[in-house]
Image (cartoon, rainbow, N blue to C red):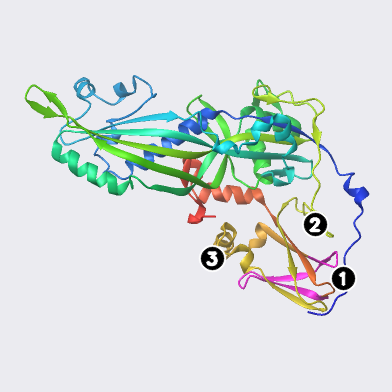
Amino acid sequence: MADIKPYERYQKINFADITKRKMLNAHLITPSLEFSYSLCIEYMKDWFLKRFNKDFFGKDFAYVYVDDSHVFDSYNRLKKDQILNRSEPGKGALAIVPVLNDEFNREQLEDSIFGVDMMLKRSRYEDSFFKDKAHDRYISARLTLIQMDFTFKVRVETLAQQLDLAKAMRQTYRVGYTQGEYISMDYALPPELMLSVAMDAGFEVKNGDIVDPIAFLYYMNSNSQLPILYKFRSVNGHNEYFMRMPNMYVWINCTNLQRDQGDRINMLKHHYNIEMNCQVRFPAAHYYILHTESKSLTAITKGEYEPSDMTFETLHDMRQFEYPSVNDRGWNSYLYTDYIDDANKILELDFTEIFQGTEMEALIKHSLGIHVSPELFMEIQIYNDLERQPITIDWEKMTVTTKNKVLSQTTNIVIFMDLNWLNNHRAEFDGIINNRFGPNVHGREP
């Protein structure tokens, strides 16, 4: 590289400007634990059953009972004699008993031990997943872990079935060892939060409902880095908003497996049981924080903490280049990075490494495969010496070339995304609209 004197090309930092940065009010909303509780049960039920033959526990898993489910649920599927016997020849029966561990606190890593004031002060709206930069409206999420203990009780008719099944379960479920997997899952966005955002953004709200949910969903996805979905929730019979979170790690520890000697009736034995205990640590939403200029949000009524004068300010990183947050098409900045190379030359940037192994690489290849330019949903801007540079882009080679020589060694790269297009693509092609959890997008792990 050419020799450059220290600090030659750095802007002077005006600390007076830093102290004048805009202050936003922070509103904390606590989501329901019931959603994460039920989602963990649904996940573990699927995790256990998918390793058995489809009809081992009866057609449509008729002989599967989950503790705390509706007591009359069996009447919807079984005949009277089947309810009494809870099995049929050659089939097994399963009972799943979940228990939430209220004593689990992640070794006191939760910031809630310092109180709500500290939770608000430590929040950074720069780290929000929802960023309406044009109107200074942000939503950040804090995640936590819940620990649940599961007991899987399997009943079969004969000793031979019990012995073989116990051996297979020890191997299949890796009893005595830990395991885990990365999945994507829904997080319910509290109705109080969504109503508050809608009212703050000027959407019409009547009788506690958003009048035009489709327009509001478009607004949310246009500013969110994660897909926002609008789904029917059977537990309450209402449509609600969900955020799809990728790369969530579920930790499972199958601690032990035991079998009994069967139930004796007179001189005969039958109904042999196997019991397996598992411990699960499942990611859950801890709380959400809405950052906005509004001091009072009347829609926040449940799980509310809204001090009238609670304002805070977080200092940004002190960089010499303040990149634009929104482009002229209304797209939010999606990624920002620096590139260092020699000055006084035409610059060719290979941005393959930026997207390698990520969802964006797959999207670019997919669009090129159907002869659609990625410029439909992505814009790349290059800045050097604090000036935007005219560029040409070769999407096939994943390169960007400046038309003029650059004057500084440091080049700033800003990538803008049409987040509404991106989130709709995720919902459609990854099928997340049809389930509450599933494998990671494109099978990626962090």
Task: Give the quadrant of the C terminus.
Answer: bottom right
Estimate the spatial distance between the alpha carbons at disc 1 and disc 2, rounded to whole Å.
Answer: 23 Å
The N terminus sits in image quarter: bottom right
Marks 1 and 2, the one that precedes in the sequence: 1
| Residue beneath disc 2 | 323
Q: Give the range drawn in magenta.
A: 383-405
In this rendering, the answer to whether 240 lies above or below 131 is above
Residue 426 in the image: state x and y as whole percent: 55, 49
Q: What element carries label 3?
A: helix
Picture quadrant where residue 139 is located: top right
Q: Give the farthest residue toward the front.
A: 107
Secondary structure of residue under mark 1: loop
Relative height, residue 151 to residue 360 (above, below)? above
Is the Cβ of the residue at disc 3 closer than 8 Å to that at disc 1? no
Residue drawn 70% across and 46% down?
127
Q: Closest to the observer: 330 or 315?
A: 315
Q: How far apart are marks 3 and 1 (CA)?
A: 47 Å
Q: Which amino acid does label 3 sit on?
A: Gly
Crowdedness near tag 3: few (<14), some (14–19) or many (≥20) residues, C-alpha within 10 Å: few
Closer to the camera: disc 3 or disc 2?
2
**Mark 1 lies on residue:** 6
Q: Where, by quadrant of the figure, is residue 142 drawn?
A: top right
What residue did someone put label 3 on?
369
| Mark before the other along the chain sequence, 3 or 1 | 1
Rendering coords of residue 3 (x, y %): 84, 79
Q: Is residue 400 part of the magenta span, yes or no?
A: yes
